[in-house]
Amino acid sequence: MSFDAAALLDAIRAFPLGEVRLMEVCGTHTMAIAKSGIRSMLPDNIKLLSGPGCPVCVTPGAVIDAVLELSMRPGITVATYGDMVRVPGSTPGDNLARRRALGAKVEVVYSPVDAVKLAAARPGEEIVFLGVGFETTAPGTAAAVLTAQEQGVKNFSLFSMLKTVEPALRALIASEGFNVQGFLCPGHVATIIGEEGFSFLPRDYALPAVISGFEPEDILLSVYALAKQLAERKPRVQNEYRRAVAPNGNPLARAVMEKCFAPRRDLWRGLGAIEGSGLGLREEFSVFDAEKRFGVEYGAEEKPSACRCGEVITGRLTSAECPLFGKRCTPEDPVGPCMVSSEGACAAYYKYQSC
């Protein structure tokens, strides 16, 4: 059966709606929307906004500053995903790449278990893995901690920056000036937490929610479903991504995650401190907790900056409305994480829409 995008767009235009602001909460959606040009296809009254769905982008400068300080300590090697190497702290240009040039030991790995293997191969070094992500990556990070425990790899530790989606969305909805009428929910996160993980949106806030896949057809169908819910005034959770997302998600993955991690207060760029929004290691795994092992301390929660990344990822500004965008801030010389990450809103807009 062929997909008729034109007919679907006509159907979206036919709904009797005023201006509608819909938010995607996934960096992969942000990039897919920009790459496919979906924003330019939609009627003028349908606006797509980027939300706090890029894990690198939501990590605030104060946390990056703590990572940078830790990286300079003797005997420590920081193991991280590639995106994190170029994310600046509160000082523009100060990142792990710069610290590596100054003598810090920084290794790029492809998975948390690779960091455990690195620790096993280098018993004379302390390997600190930067655990970044949402519920999608948390089970794999938990598996790495369990692997280190089972194999007796004592020089491996985790600096957890893991976060959960629901508390952040609740904080966003409660924030001053919130103006979003529906959510395009993250398909990757939903594979873990299932449809039920987003039921709070219609139940507590009367907001439509559609779990979407990542192909242009998925996203257009999801926008149509959101518009239809708004037109009918019947908000609910719809699962457009049924080929990957089960109603109850992945109980085994959640069990592994919950075995290692407990919710804790955490810092978010653009949203500040949110209770229960982070994942910290449980006490029985504290020997692998880098923050406790090395006495990590944090500075101010969020310093004033000309970078408007925090407002971009909370839907208050578009990337193009940031005064630094495409001028002082480019992918070659990024000021903020939204221009660094492969899932960042500014990087997506710059690559596909700014020319």
Image (cartoon, rainbow, N blue to C red):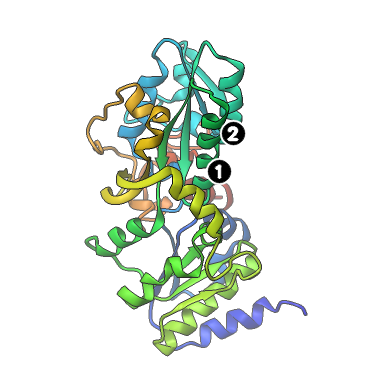
> What's the residue at 53%, 49% (across, down)?
348
User: As displayed, is residue 106 above or below residue 139?
Assistant: above
Q: Where residue 316 appears, x then y in whole percent?
A: 32, 58
Callouts 2 and 1 close, C-beta under 8 Å? yes
State whether residue 153 appears in this view. yes
Number of the label disc, if any, that sits on residue 140: 1
Q: Which mark is residue 65?
A: none
Using the image, determine if residue 32 lies above or below residue 20: above
**Where on the picture, by quarter, is residue 294?**
top left
Q: Residues within 10 Å of mark 2 (few under 14, many from 20)?
A: many
Residue 27 seen in render:
no
Q: Residue at x 30, y 51 (%)?
A: 276
Q: Nearer the viewer, residue 106 or 1?
A: 106
Q: Secondary structure at mark 2?
A: helix
User: Who's the residue at 52% across and 67% down the image?
Assistant: 248
C-alpha gap between disc 2 and disc 1: 8 Å
Counting the numbered discs, the total is 2
Residue 87: x, y in percent?
44, 33
| Circle 1 SS class | helix
Amino acid at the residue labelled 1? Gly
Q: Which residue is mark 2?
A: 113
The quarter in which the N terminus is drawn is bottom right
Estimate the x, y position of residue 286 in percent, counting from the top left.
Answer: 37, 32
Whether 224 is drawn above or below 154: the answer is: below
| Amino acid tagged 2 | Val
- Please name whichever residue, 337 or 277, is drawn nearer the observer in this view of the structure: 277
Residue 272 location, x and y as percent? Answer: 26, 47
Query: How many residues crowd mark 1 within 10 Å: few (<14), some (14–19), many (20+)?
Result: some
For residue 113, side relative to residue 163 (left or right): right
